[in-house]
Image (tube, grey):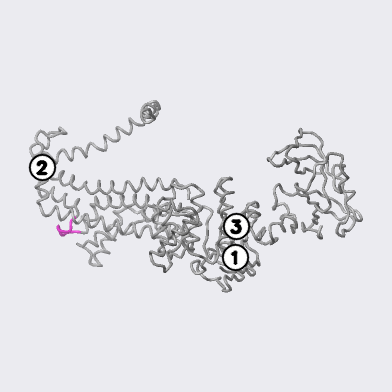
Amino acid sequence: MSTQTQPLQAYGNLRPGRIVAWTILFLGGVVMITPLLFMFSTSLKSAGQVYDLRLIPDQPTLANYVKVLSDGRFVRWFANSTIIATVVTLSCLFFDSLVAYTLAKFAFPGRRLVFLAILSTLMIPTEMLVIPWYLMASKLGWIDSYLGIMFPGLVTAFGVFLMRQFFETVPNDFLEAARVDGLNEFAIWWKVALPLVTPALSALAIFTFLGNWTAFFWPLIVTTDPSLYTLPVGLSSFAVEQSIQWELIMTGAALATLPTLAIFLFFQRYIVRGVMLAGVKG
Amino acid sequence: MARIELQQIVKRYGTVTTVRGIDLTIEDGEFVVLVGPSGCGKSTTLRMIAGLEPISGGTLRIGGEVVNNHEPKHRNIAMVFQNYAIYPHLTVAQNIGFGLYTSKLSKAQKQARIRETARTLSLEPYLDRRPAALSGGQRQRVAIGRAMVRDPVAFLFDEPLSNLDAQLRGQMRLEIKQLHQRLGSTIVFVTHDQVEAMSLADRIVVMRDGSILQVGSPMELYNRPADIFTARFIGTPEMNMIDAVATGGGLTPEANGAAVDLSRVTGLPPLAPGQTVILGIRPHELQLLSGGEAPFPIRIEGKVRVCEPHGPETFVLLDLPQGSVVARAPATASFRPGETVAFGAQTAALRLFDKQTGMRIGSA
């Protein structure tokens, strides 16, 4: 009985403010999703249909997907991006949260200074850092290597900042209880503190993975060997070589969005569960 | 089980001293409650015993061994926190088992120990649940279970009942007392609630401003408080205090008016004539006068401001020229505000405190 009346009650709560909010959200959603829909739509069109702007193609075809996936370079770039984004994400989750935990939960001289120093690096634009990074990579022999592409992102100031804010909210009682129970400091971080900040870890994982998956500027500079290209760099070269074959570029881009969707869907439930846990006393 | 000895224990944070050289010996199997107002140093003392706060001075021994510089895990003590500190991402069984993290027991032995602990605390049906699905009392029992499972030499409780509602607090108080009777373990319990202290402790340690004011059994503290602070802190409602002046073998109220008659008080400790004192009388030691009884050594008369029926008894707040006094009346008593009522007490009910030092005078 009650389940039948709930929808009616929900509609009964419609207020003008809510209608305005939903309208804005709907329009925002349309703006966000339209390019994606066109990307998928174009990937299903033949070369001659590309400039036909209808969303549903007359004669949808998977030929572009076959062509792109049978091109060994695309698979290689896809693998490169997967490896780089995964390693950088895991590294960030580990090191950022380790540094953040230390800054949030241990009192030591200069703690605030260290945190401010880390934060201050957020103010420096990437364009300014590229030359020092390049010189460093060049001196260390990391040009045209995975390490060269990855090293600037292995530990990030943003990740440290985000995780520190969350670790600050973890009650000290949890950590002290574990200390009394005999855990060493690393185990306390790993077994007690980290599981309590899963929403933040999930958010950081999504941001870091997406950021590295779509990274273009630095991978373009630090790689000259096409076999080490990441997907965005590879796709751009694809465009130049193939005299802009939009249907192939859109197919590559459509395939490139799949891992990001998977990552989001995977971590989303942890974000929701984390929010639920955070609402429980004790 | 172990004896815990604190010798001249000091805690300083920079230039601020929060615990000022306290001496205390907690015997093996004893239930000791540290009680006092916020900021008195009771929790800091407990945390120093646990090893969660470095000790700035003095010696701490557990089981005869000096443990000042031992890590918490090397003291073999267990602690129950105010906010339970049970992990929301683990089940009840995993939470209880967390106490065995460093144990060298086999997995089967650990499981058996967890089950046994859960049975003791009536948590068996909830072993697979997460804390979010438990009530406040059950969560507190899980926290106690995690402490118990290790079989520590002592349990430390840091205001563990503060987050519970009044009914559950009473129930958990009983459970903790029964647990102590069953396990016979050394327990140090911190609270700011004197009812908790009175009902649980073998001995109560009253603290204020980082010092110990008095150590004794609940009834010792209730009947023979060492100073005004302890006298007011222990007992509900708190002890009435009336200013008086010594008059060659007797007492007279300091304020004018005939509301307090002390002319029949005898058998007082030696007092210098003119010495100002504070008389302490507990509300329970005042008896409602109907007019027909023999005169009481102490007679207090005032106008009723408020009546508070408590079921088995009624507390009456009387306005006097000297201030106000709370007295216990029978449950059947009923007074109108403004009505004049008289109460009497025996000399034995009087506690005398020096007005200058606040300390109790003699054995009165």
x and y percent of residue B87 in the render? 44, 54
Residue at position x 39%, y 59% in the image: A191
Read off the residue under disc 1: B29
Q: Residue furthest bottom?
A: B65
x and y percent of residue B26 in the render? 62, 66
Read off the residue under disc 3: B190
Tell me the kind of residue under disc 3: Val
Q: Nearer the viewer, residue B242 or B307?
A: B307
Picture quarter with the N terminus of chain A: top left
Q: Chain of mark 1?
A: B
x and y percent of residue A23 in the render? 33, 30
Question: Is label 1 on the same chain as label 3?
Answer: yes
Residue at position x 63%, y 51% in the image: B193
Image quadrant assignment for residue A15: top left
* Horizontal side of residue B257 vs A187, given as left or right: right
Are the two marked residues, 2 and 3, in contact with CB atoms closer than 8 angstroms?
Answer: no
Labels 1, 3: front one: 1
Q: Chain of mark 3?
A: B
Which badge, 1 or 3, comes first in the chain's sequence? 1
Q: How many marks?
A: 3
Q: Tell me the distance, in whole angstroms, between the alpha carbons under discs 2 and 3.
A: 72 Å
Q: Magenta stretch?
A: A223-229
Image quadrant assignment for residue B17: bottom right
Mark linked to residue B62 = none
Disc 3 residue crowd, few under 14, some 14–19, many 20+, Cα 10 Å: many
Read off the residue under disc 2: A62
Q: Nearer the viewer, residue B297 or B41?
A: B297
